[in-house]
Image (tube, helix red, strand yellow):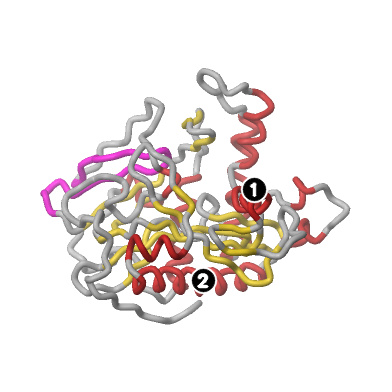
Amino acid sequence: MILAFSLVLGTDNQPQDTDSSASFHPRSHPSLPGCENGPVTNSTTPPQLDGWLHRYSGKVRDLYVPADGSDAHLLVVASNRVSAFDHVLEPPIPGKGALLTALSNWWFERIDLPNHLAGEGSGAPAVPEEVADRAMVTRRLDMHPIECVVRGALTGSGFAEYQRTGAVCGIELPSGIEDGDLLETPIYTPAYKAPLGEHDENITFERSVELVGVEVATALRDASLRIFTAARDLAAERGVILADTKFEFGRDPETGALVLADEVLTSDSSRYWDAEAYADTSRDRAERLASFDKQIVRNWLRAHWDGTGEPPALPDEIVERTYARYRELYTRLTGLER
């Protein structure tokens, strides 16, 4: 096990805008990540699944509810869609959904914290065979409106904020940090999960206390840092650097326990680097910080699209290289082949 702790939270500090009732807003259920803040922008039609009714599609995931009208569970299907620059691209990446689901499940098994998976004996409808390798049956939760970001390195939007202010989400950092530098201690930099169609907002820990109360905010921060630290150490043993990631949590409406939800520590929710490449200072920064995700797609689009109209179709080579990058991370972390 990576870590073991259990948190039970009172009801006094729950956020005012969460609801475990039959709402299908992506901010009200446990499994559509922050980057899903918007509907699918292409014509992809989610499959009809026996025993389930489709309710929502994000850029990458499709959400279903039980056809019998019960509201205790959800089916979340990871598609093979790939998005960049607020567009869902064509063609999809075959096998991507299965890899993301398998990696999430692998991490869930190693994190000894309650998670959103329904599990056997829950009474939930079965996962349909046609999506069995890329779907999860989850429990409904009262979701916290905080995206729990942990940074072990400074890059991306965090580095941009540091350049402007010398701090990230209110955390003052030493001067002289360069893009991609590892931090001596991981930092917790939360974001407020904005309503559908709006952009998430980076916030300070103090602001998160105002949103959800000190007990919940502290529990979210502490759980995120402990999971990140353990996952970072495990990844390092496999020659991989976990640079940053995001977690989402909900509250079990029956027990009050903090529950880990959404995808966890995948290529889409995390930034991983190859440790050997990172240590080779003779390489340029782009090579040292090459991540195990869709960065190949982003780079190709920047070179072949001016951002107007619909993006061009991805060449077969880009599709294959992107899938290979996702698969390499899965294999290196888990030691398993897919």
Q: Residue 60: horizontal and vertical position, in percent?
A: 42, 41
Which residue type does callout 1 highlight? Ala
Q: Is residue 65 magenta?
A: yes
Q: Residue 316: horizontal and vertical position, in percent?
A: 61, 30
Residue 47's image quarter? top left
Front-most of residues 240 and 154 = 154
Front-most of residues 113 and 223 = 223
Q: Secondary structure at mark 2?
A: helix
Taking 3 as reference, is 289 left or right? right
Marks 1/2: CA–CA distance: 22 Å
* Mark carried by residue 53: none
Residue denoted by label 2: 225
Chief secondary structure of the magenta portion: strand
User: Extreme front residue here?
Assistant: 165
Can residue 103 be seen at all in this image of the molecule?
A: no
Which residue type does callout 2 highlight? Leu
Residue denoted by label 1: 160
**Exactly how many numbered labels are in the figure?**
2
Q: Is residue 98 above or below residue 297?
A: below
Instruction: Give the extent of the magenta segment.
Output: 51-70
